[in-house]
């Protein structure tokens, strides 16, 4: 796909770069076997996680499985990373849950499709370096806030609380949870605590069986045995909580058939009616779609960077964004929620020997077979066990050690941004947090860039040249843009009455935008009115061209351009007598 032509060089996007690299490397039978085993390993981890993250997002668990199936195949084949594993992630939970509550499943899938379109546009616009311009405190603040919100919302199922409906904001929901603690169910708490204990202890055994699988098996078996032996023992399970209807038959748990194609706008809204498609709906969902796209791009590119460090491979960031966009455009058409690359699953893939998109495809096929063959068994998984699993996911995502370390050692501005992003994510929502966080990060960057630009007058004696009394030389260092131009140039206009010529040494000026050009025009006119000449020294040719186009050129011998400071001093006598260099 070619975007534009410049001379004889074509500038475009190298589509399917990860797949092409994998095919060109001519994988051996051992590589294929390693990728199949890695895919199976990741599939075992992804299957329960996909269900848990869908439940946390406010939709039935099968929609998380559909996401892992479609996204795992499509994004792996069209993206720019050979080892990324894509699917539902915890980062999206805080964004998706309010959408489901307000617009229902249909609204969620439409916003996911819109986010996919935005991601493709970001990739075509070559914004793959996005991860490099987002400050570390912003990322840590988002992720820590998301972790806190996810953990809070799991308290209800972990303890089996009967929480009253209502509460739009975090503090209101937290108050409802606190008031519901008298309804604590010891059966749910026992199963949840057992699952959590296994999740924490199992990794220390260093066995190849994933902790997620072992914990859910233990929780499910204990819950089933206790239910069969104790008359008053009862726990909520996936089968008792979720239901489906197919061909007029109502079933419990996860439907044991393939995801089907369906337009998202035909799916229900928050009140169970088809949501439809309108410009007003698109306008209302656009902020959430932008937030999903931004967070998805950050998560996928960060995951690719981590995977590169572990595998020694190199990803194509723009291709990865396009692949993520294509995946998120297709996933909603089969009932899947927004997807992005998952760091935990990708790391497990690399550690298990995965080095090509084949492992991601195998992981998706495993989940597909799990739906077809294991749906009745999956229905026995207790909701308390799923809550325990999400508590661990939330803790790992919060990166508490990095959060505390940043608060201790970071500059004050970074700490304030960290705490603000964290607070906004928890107390309000991710859309507000992303907008404010990115805006503050941009302002902080501008302020720090302004501090890099400095203007100072040189001493009367420079090297072996003595500066005449009626000449002043200003050394300008750093970029001149809308934030720094006024600060750097305002002192130049305030010259002494006895000064006849001003020399601007711009050897270290790296940027000149329209605001700086306007400021330069103002200085030229002001100095001309005072009959003061101006020499601009060693400015890059492309910037001189900008000034000349704007009219900052030779005017009655009062503006000159020189290449060295010595040349500037040679021009002084010519300008005193009103002569011109040309």
Image (tube, rainbow, N blue to C red):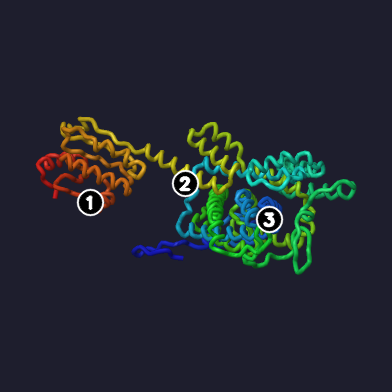
| Residue 185 sits in quarter | top right
Tell me the element at label 2.
helix
Residue indicated by mark 3: 59
Tell me the element at label 1.
loop
Image mark for residue 133: 2
Left or right of residue 404, residue 373 in this image:
right
Q: Where is residue 208 in the image (x, y as percent from the top left)?
A: 71, 48
Residue 348 in view here: yes
Query: Which residue sits furthest left?
Result: 577
* 183 to 28, vertically: above or below: above
* 155 to 17, vertically: above or below: above
Label 1 – label 3 distance at C-alpha: 62 Å
Left or right of residue 467, residue 489 in this image:
right
Closer to the camera: disc 3 or disc 2? 3
Image mark for residue 551: 1
Whether the residues at callouts 3 and 2 have beta carbons within 8 Å, the answer is: no
Upstream in the sequence, badge 1 or badge 3? Answer: 3
Seen from the viewer's position, the closer of residues 457 and 352 is 457
Label 1 – label 2 distance at C-alpha: 35 Å
Name the residue: 67% across, 67% down: 260
């Amino acid at each position: 796909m070619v975007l534009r032509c410049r001379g004889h060089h074509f500038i475009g996007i190298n589509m399917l770069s990860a797949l092409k690299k994998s095919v060109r490397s001519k994988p051996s039978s051992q590589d294929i076997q390693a990728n199949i085993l890695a895919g199976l390993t990741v599939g075992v981890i992804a299957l329960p996680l996909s269900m848990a993250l869908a439940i946390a997002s406010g939709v039935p668990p099968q929609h998380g499985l559909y996401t892992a199936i479609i996204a795992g195949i499509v994004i792996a084949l069209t993206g720019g990373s050979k080892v990324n594993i894509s699917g539902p992630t915890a980062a999206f939970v805080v964004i998706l849950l309010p959408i489901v509550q307000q617009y229902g499943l249909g609204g969620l899938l439409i916003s996911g499709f819109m986010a996919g379109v935005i991601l493709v546009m970001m990739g075509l616009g070559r914004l793959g370096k996005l991860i490099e311009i987002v400050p570390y405190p912003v990322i840590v603040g988002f992720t820590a806030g998301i972790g806190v919100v996810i953990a809070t919302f799991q308290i209800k199922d972990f303890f089996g609380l009967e929480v009253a409906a209502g509460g739009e904001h975090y503090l209101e929901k937290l108050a409802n949870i606190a008031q519901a603690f008298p309804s604590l169910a010891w059966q749910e708490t026992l199963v949840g605590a057992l699952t959590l204990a296994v999740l924490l202890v199992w990794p220390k055994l260093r066995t190849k069986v994933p902790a997620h699988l072992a914990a859910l098996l233990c929780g499910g078996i204990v819950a089933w045995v206790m239910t069969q032996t104790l008359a008053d023992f009862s726990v909520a399970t996936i089968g008792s909580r979720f239901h489906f209807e197919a061909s007029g038959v109502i079933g419990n748990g996860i439907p044991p058939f393939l995801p089907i194609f369906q337009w998202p706008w035909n799916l229900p809204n928050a009140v169970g009616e088809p949501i439809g498609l309108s410009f007003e709906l698109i306008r209302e969902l656009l902020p959430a779609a932008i937030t999903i796209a931004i967070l998805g791009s950050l998560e996928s590119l960060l995951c690719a960077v981590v995977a590169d460090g572990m595998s020694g491979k190199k990803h194509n960031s723009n291709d990865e964004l396009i692949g993520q966009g294509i995946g998120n455009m297709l996933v909603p058409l089969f009932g899947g929620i927004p997807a992005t690359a998952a760091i935990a699953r990708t790391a497990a893939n690399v550690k298990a020997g995965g080095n090509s998109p084949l492992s991601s495809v195998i992981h998706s096929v495993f989940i597909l077979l799990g739906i077809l063959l294991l749906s009745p068994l999956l229905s026995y998984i207790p909701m308390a066990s799923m809550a325990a699993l999400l508590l661990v996911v939330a803790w790992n995502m919060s990166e508490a050690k990095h959060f505390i370390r940043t608060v201790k050692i970071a500059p004050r501005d970074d700490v304030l941004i960290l705490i603000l992003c964290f607070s906004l994510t928890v107390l309000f929502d991710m859309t507000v947090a992303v907008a404010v966080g990115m805006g503050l990060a941009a302002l902080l960057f501008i302020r720090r860039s302004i501090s890099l630009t400095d203007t100072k007058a040189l001493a009367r004696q420079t090297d072996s040249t003595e500066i005449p009394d009626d000449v002043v030389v200003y050394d300008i260092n750093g970029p001149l843009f809308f934030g720094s131009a006024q600060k750097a140039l305002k002192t130049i206009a305030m010259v002494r009455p006895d000064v006849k010529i001003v020399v601007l040494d711009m050897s270290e000026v790296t940027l000149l935008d329209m605001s700086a050009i306007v400021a330069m025009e103002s200085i030229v006119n002001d100095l001309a009115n005072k009959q003061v000449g101006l020499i601009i020294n060693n400015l890059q040719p492309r910037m001189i061209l900008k000034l000349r186009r704007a009219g900052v050129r030779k005017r009655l011998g009062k503006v000159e351009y020189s290449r060295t400071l010595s040349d500037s001093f040679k021009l002084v006598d010519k300008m005193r007598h009103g002569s011109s260099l040309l």
